[in-house]
Image (cartoon, rainbow, N blue to C red):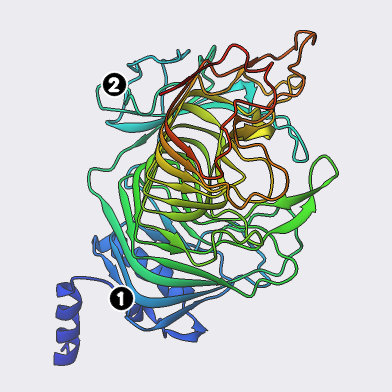
Amino acid sequence: MKRFISLSACLAALGAAAASFVTYEEFGAVGDGKADDQAAIVAAHAAANERNLPVKAADGKTYYIGKGAKPAVIKTDVDFGTANFLIDDVGLSDVKKPIFVVEPSRKPERLAGVDTLKEGQTRFAAKLPGASLVVAVNANVKHYIRYGANQNNGTAQKEVFLVDANGAIDPRTPITCDFATVTELTAYPLEAKTLTIRGGHFTTIANQAESRYNYHGRNLHIRRSNVRVTGLRHDVTGEGEHGAPYGGFLNIGPCANVVVSNCTLTAHRTYSTIGSAGRPVSMGSYDLLVNTAARVSFLDCRQTTDIHDGRYWGLFASNFCKDLLFDHCSFSRFDAHMGVANATILNSELGHMGINAIGFGTFRVENTTVCGRHFFNLRGDYGSTWHGDFIIKNCIYKPRGGGQPEIVGGRYNDRHDFGYPCFMPRKLAIDGLTIDDTQHPGKYGGPYIFGNLNPADKPGAEPPPYPYHVTEEVELRNVKVLSGLPLRTSPNAHMFRKTKVTAK
């Protein structure tokens, strides 16, 4: 018996075969802002991955994302265009699953044959699957043993670095510490082709959960190297008197070579909870989070909320990263929690939370306005440590909050073991800095280069169990204090008695 296929079915089949992209509507999406389109979105991306076709959302439509826990896996280019995505986070049962996850084409590989690592080594001896991001762990050593209201017992020693196919280590992602033992070693192969995600207006209806550390992850999680995100916007609505924190609407890592350009994000409200030491703490919540990543750049990005409004937490945070860049960005802060090696901020403005830095290498800030309490704040909970140099060029510092203006501030406890020796930047080089302290209230004698980072460092003090390595050299060129008052070294002159300060 012969089977006859209708002309319309033939045309539909030919159209599907000839399609140059996949749409959500092909899989049942409605786009009216009411019907739950998450299953259709997941199915569309699965089909696009199988056919190796890009995905294109329908301009102007609103796709509602309900309570489903299955993420849409992205492995091809996406054009969200002017489509809207409404993400409903009220009453979730599974708060950790991303909405979209950008996955690599190749899985990570466990490596063998490397038992130790040395600070500054230039080559890597393991057999590699090609150019890769390598993550090394020594579970026998704890670093970042946190001090204060959110105290903890630290985390395993970790290094993240880029290597080429022949094992040469990228000098911008250096190995920063010796490893007596490597207990885990993983290579994340770099993709040859850049994947692009373009456009899209995403709005999160904020959770109304209890204010405690239960980070929500309903986001766009990038786990693939060589990705560009451009023209995306994320808003937050419905924040109330309490809520659980967010772990980044853009959550990046483990991966490398990611560029986020011309994007607009939103800072979340600051809520209070009880920290691990039993005391109230402000609870961090982020719209940008970068973890275990290298060479991540933010270009021409901004936030919807006022960067000077203290009701909102800092937009950006990072852990275990190397070679981070802000260029032409306007954010409430830069923050490296558990270490960054080499960071650059250019042509930008940072708001009320300023620059918070823990890490290694060179931190360069150029043509930038910083409006925090300090220009650089060395985080006291992680040992106020920067093992390297700070460079400031042609910048403006506008101290906020009514405290004493300090170019480098922080607080070090020389009785606490942070898991590593702690350093102030070896050298602070300033060539062009205007300190706008004209609004400073009350009696005031002028700004300091350094705050009193270690009050215990005073004449006659007993040698501490965990000494602090103080800055060796300060170079000052073209520094202007608008109040007309002098720029002084520190309220703790004894601490900086051996620091060489040269003004030119």
Q: Residue furthest right?
A: 278
Residue 256: percent from left, percent from top: 36, 40
475 on left or right of 14: right
Given residues 503 and 188, the one toward you in this image is 503
Q: Nearer the viewer, mark 2 or mark 1?
A: 2
Check disc 1 and report its element: helix, strand or loop: loop
Which amino acid type is shown beneath numbered disc 2? Ala
Q: Quadrant of the N terminus?
A: bottom left
Q: Can residue 454 be seen?
A: yes
Quarter occupied by residue 459? top right
Residue 216: percent from left, percent from top: 62, 58
Q: Residue furthest front?
A: 484
Which residue in the protein does label 1 denote? 23
Q: Can residue 186 be seen?
A: no
Which residue in the protein does label 2 denote? 168
Distance between the alpha carbons at the discs numbered 2 and 1: 42 Å
Quarter occupied by residue 89? bottom right
Residue 187: percent from left, percent from top: 39, 31
Residue at image position (28%, 43%) is 191
Quarter occupied by residue 310? bottom right
- Do the CB atoms of the residues marked 2 and 1 lie less than 8 Å apart? no
First along the sequence among labels 2 and 1: 1
Residue 74: percent from left, percent from top: 36, 59
Label 1 crowd (10 A; few <14 / some 14-19 / many >=20): many
Which amino acid type is shown beneath numbered disc 1? Thr
Residue at image position (78%, 54%) is 273
Check disc 2 and report its element: helix, strand or loop: loop
